[in-house]
Amino acid sequence: MKLKCDDLIIHSDCDEIPRANIIRKLADKDTNAILQFTNYVNFLNLSDGVWERCRVVSFKYFKSIQDLRQDIFIRNAFDSRRIRWPLLWIPDFFTTRRYFLNIFPKFIRPTSLDVVMNAGWHFNNLLPPEMIITKIKNSSHTEWNTVEVRSKAIENYYQGKDIYTAKRLKLENIDKNYPECIYKNIHNWRSYIFQNIN
């Protein structure tokens, strides 16, 4: 089946869930957007601010998945540059350039992405405690796979903290802001609801 110009391309991880009504609205117009999700960590009701990674673009603007990923990196890095020249070194994980061009800084300008607020949910590390060390050891984020992080991860989990950094997470009420399958069937999700804030 051939894609049409107004078809949507959505690039996201499987733990990033856009709201269906947001996608329906974006499908009705020319779209080049990044979706802002609430970032839930370890449990359904512990949050850590917002998460901007899901890209939605009309097919007419689509070049490649790598271009979508590069836009995310540039958006996140643009304001944190120490030197304000219009140049940025793009890590190999995000770059669209090959054949040794990726070793040079790239000329950049601010991204022109539409930011869609409150557009969904990012459920990160939503797994039983016996899987935490396995996740740390097997994650592509090898920088977190250290003896120090692994030795404190389970304790951090049970204390309502980020398993890697020990940052205290915010307790949220589960209500209609959540996916319908969660707030209407809360009894099915008891093991993923944090209870013991100290």
Image (cartoon, helix red, strand yellow):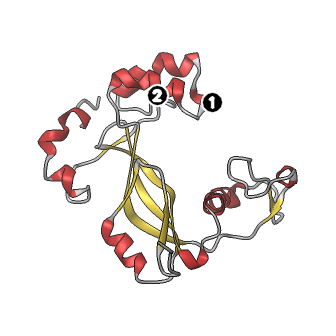
Sequence-first tag of 1 and 2: 2
Q: Position of residue 189 (x, y in %)?
A: 19, 39
Q: Position of residue 5 (x, y in %)?
A: 53, 81
Q: Is 147 drawn above or below residue 142 in the view shown?
A: above
Q: Is 99 drawn above or below residue 57 in the view shown?
A: above
The structure residue drawn at horizontal position 41% and vertical position 78%, both measured from the top left corner, is 27
Label 1 crowding class (10 Å Cα cut-off): few <14, some 14-19, many 20+? Answer: few
Q: Name the kind of residue labelled 2 in the image.
A: Lys
The structure residue drawn at horizontal position 47% and vertical position 76%, both measured from the top left corner, is 7
Label 2 crowding class (10 Å Cα cut-off): few <14, some 14-19, many 20+? Answer: some
Q: Is residue 102 left or right of residue 72?
A: right
The structure residue drawn at horizontal position 46% and vertical position 35%, both measured from the top left corner, is 167
The structure residue drawn at horizontal position 51% and vertical position 77%, both measured from the top left corner, is 31
SS category of the residue bearing label 2: helix
Q: Is residue 29 visible?
A: yes
Q: Position of residue 191 (x, y in %)?
A: 22, 32
| Quarter of the image that includes the C terminus | top left
Of badges 1 and 2, the one in the foreground is: 2
SS category of the residue bearing label 1: helix
User: For this rendering, which residue is in front, 92 or 143?
Assistant: 92
Q: Which residue is mark 2?
A: 135
Q: Which residue is mark 1?
A: 143
Q: Work out how far the residue at label 1 is from the one at label 2, CA to CA, in angstroms.
A: 13 Å
